[in-house]
Image (cartoon, grey):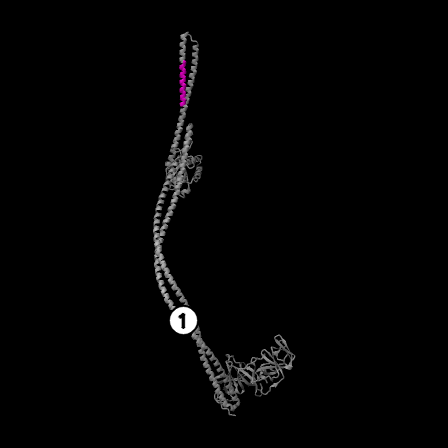
Amino acid sequence: MAKDATESKNTSLTGLAIAFGVALSGVLLLLLNQGMNGAPGWSYNLFLLLAGVLLWGYSYVYRGQQLLHSRVAHGERVNTEAEKALVLALDRLRAGDLVNCAERSRELPGRLSGTFSHATSALDVLAQQIQASSVEVASAANAVNEIASELASGSSEQAASVVEITAAMEELARTASQIAENAATQAELAQRAEESGNIGKAAVEEAVQGIEEARKRIQGIASRAEILGTRSKEIYRVLDLITDIAQETHILSLNAAIEAAAAKDHGRRFSVVAEEVRRLAQRSQESVDSVRNLLDEFASSIRATVVATEEGSKEATRVLERARFAADAIESLRDASGDSARVAREISLATQQQNAASDEVVLTLKEVSHVVQRMADGLKQFSDTADRLNQLGLIIQMLAQSFHLASPHSLKHLAESWASDVRRRLGNWEAIERLLEDLVNQQPYVECLYFYDGKAGQVALTVNRQIIGDREIPLAVRAGEGFNERPWYKAAVQEKYPILTAKFVSLLSEQPIFTAAAPIYEKGELVGVLGLDVNLDSWSKI
Amino acid sequence: MTTAEPLVGTGRRRGGLSAGSHLLVQAGEYVCALPLRSVRRVLRALTVHPLPGATDELKGLAEFGGEPLPVLELSRLIGAPPGAKPAHPVTIVVWVGPQDARELVGLAADAALEVSEVQLTSVVAGEGGFVLGEALVDGAVVRVVNLEALGGDR
Amino acid sequence: MSPALHPVAQRGYLLVRRDGVLWGVENGAVEGLSRHGAQFRLAVGGAELGVDEVVGVVAELAVWPLTGALRRFWPDTAGGLAVHAEAPLVIVDPQRPPRALRIAGSEGEMSDGEGRH
């Protein structure tokens, strides 16, 4: 435009100059002619020539003027459109809609468009970086929180362990004291046992000596009994001999009687003698029988005595063995008692030392407990800081999401994209519902997705059951009651572009959410608004 | 020859022997009476050599006074139940068979008891065989052996 | 033994033992003597007799006839009784050797008119 104006000015000045020059030339020429001859001659021709030149010059100037006017008018139009586009672009920029801003900037003239486009691109990149950074901050904050939680949990466990150990150590100290007391008692008892062992050993030795004496006496009795047994055998032999003699005598007497009978009267006196001899033999036999009976009893007694002495000797031997065994046992017991007393004293000393060590351990554990407690407090602060970082990340994300970026992480872009999908299915409500069901599961942070036709008052709504669970969708929500007055609807209608609401509590999940909404226009007319509820607990998944 | 004094009761007569004098012997569980006039000798049990093919009553052959002597088991002859093992077994050498054909035979018994009077009139006839009958001697039953029947078959 | 009979002195006898019983055989009646394993075989009166032991030979023996009481309880045949070395023995009748000495399976008929009870 300046160029055109300058050019136009120059053209006009040239025209004026030429006109002035022609006019002057004409005047001069006319004057000259008059002065000389009074007739127009070659000067007049010259004048005509000049006039022609002048007319051409004027027409040149006129064209220049026309060109200038058209150029000026074009320039003004261009400026107006550029201004308009710039205003729209800046308006989108104001709204953070870098996508539409970039589209608008293409309408800007020349370098203005490129420069604006570069600027929006740079801003887009920055916003995406900020968005990504916020997610990283949130992730880092979550990681820190998890670590802090683990550390806090560990420190809690440590604290609990310290408490347990402290209790155990105190119990150990009490037990050690008890052991020391028991050990002292044990030592005293062992001492008494040792003394008793000495007494017992002496008694056993005395008993062993007595048993030895008794065994010797028993053996003496057994020997004498054996001798008596031998003597009785000899007596039996004598008795047998006497029996034989008595039997022979008896037979002799019988034979004498027989001979006396054979001798008849002559043998009468002999028969008397024979009878006397028979009686003598009978008495002898009876005496022998009597002596044999007595001897049998005597032999039986002797045998019983021998058996008894043998049994007694065996028993004495067994008792002696047991006595010796008992003496050995008493000796061992006495030694063991001595060892036991010594060990008990050592135990007592060791438990005293253990007590002192336990006290030190308890003190140390108490200090450890304080440290653990301070660490737990610090971790809590750490965790609080991580929570604040998380919140900060969320704030930054929300700020970043306020921009409409050409990025799959931009919620406004997502809403706009899904709104386009819905727009293509307008008139087929079932298709819209199926589309919503497909879309809601594509993003894990979308809690609820819905399309509301404000004029018809119809709503297609679907929820993400992985977030909502089995909660029932209120009938009012299903019916879209009051959707016209919802902030997301009103903002989207007002802005005519995708919007983002502030956070609020969801009716469905009773958790904090915010809504991204995009208006849908068909042939310039609003046909509805698509809304998606983002669960703040899942915001880092954006 | 002296006149036989009358027997009083069944007790032994002191100072004399009569025709009723018998040698009492133990054979198994029975007490047997052998007429004294038929008794030759009372001996300790002789060593007897059994003869193969002999009956149960014949114990075997023995040697007596340089002569062979058949020995019979008295308890089997009279059918006495066996008693306890005898402490002093004897062999009674007796005359058997009729007076005109007497033979010496040995009778193996468990014991020789005494010479006693057995009233012949009180003898109760037995069932036959080698037992003449039974009699009471001092209240005890004795079986009187028929030695004449022991001889050889006529 | 019957005191009415006197002992009869005979000529030499061969003394043998069988089953613990001592037997005497008149030397002249011995027809043959052979060993048969652990036993001896004696040929007497045409019969073959088995003995466990040949004790010896004696020059003479006092022989008593068999008593009736013996025959009553011992039905076998014999030539008499004798005593040697305080032991009784039975004299073999060469005409009728006793069954007790016969070898099993070689017993022939025997006249048992005496000795049976």
Residue A448, by quadrant, is: top left
Is residue A71 visible in the rendered image? The answer is yes
- Magenta region's main secondary structure? helix
Q: Which residue sits furthest top?
A: A37
Residue B58, by quadrant, is: bottom right
Is residue A516 covered in magenta? no
In depth, the one of A492 and B125 nearer the eye is A492
In depth, the one of C64 and A533 nearer the eye is C64
Mark 1 neighbour class, 10 Å CA radius: few under 14, some 14 to 19, many 20 or more: some
Q: Is residue A336 above or below residue B93?
A: above
Q: Quadrant of the N terminus of chain C?
A: bottom right
In this picture, residue C89 sits left or right of residue A540: right
Mark count: 1
Q: Which residues are magenta?
A: A1-22
Please name the residue that numbered disc 1 is placed on. Answer: A211
Is residue A12 covered in magenta? yes
Percent coordinates x, y for residue A74 in the rendering: 41, 24
Q: Quadrant of the C terminus of chain C?
A: bottom right
**Residue type pointed to by label 1:** Ile
In depth, the one of A522 and A273 nearer the eye is A273
Read off the chain for label 1. Answer: A
Percent coordinates x, y for residue A159 in the rendering: 36, 49
Percent coordinates x, y for residue A519 in the rendering: 40, 34
Percent coordinates x, y for residue B1 in the rendering: 52, 92
Query: For the residue labelled by badge 1, is the local secondary structure a helix, a strand or a loop?
Result: helix
Residue A512, by quadrant, is: top left
Is residue A518 visible in the rendered image? The answer is no
Q: Is residue A72 above or below residue B66?
A: above
Q: Is residue A482 above or below residue C75?
A: above
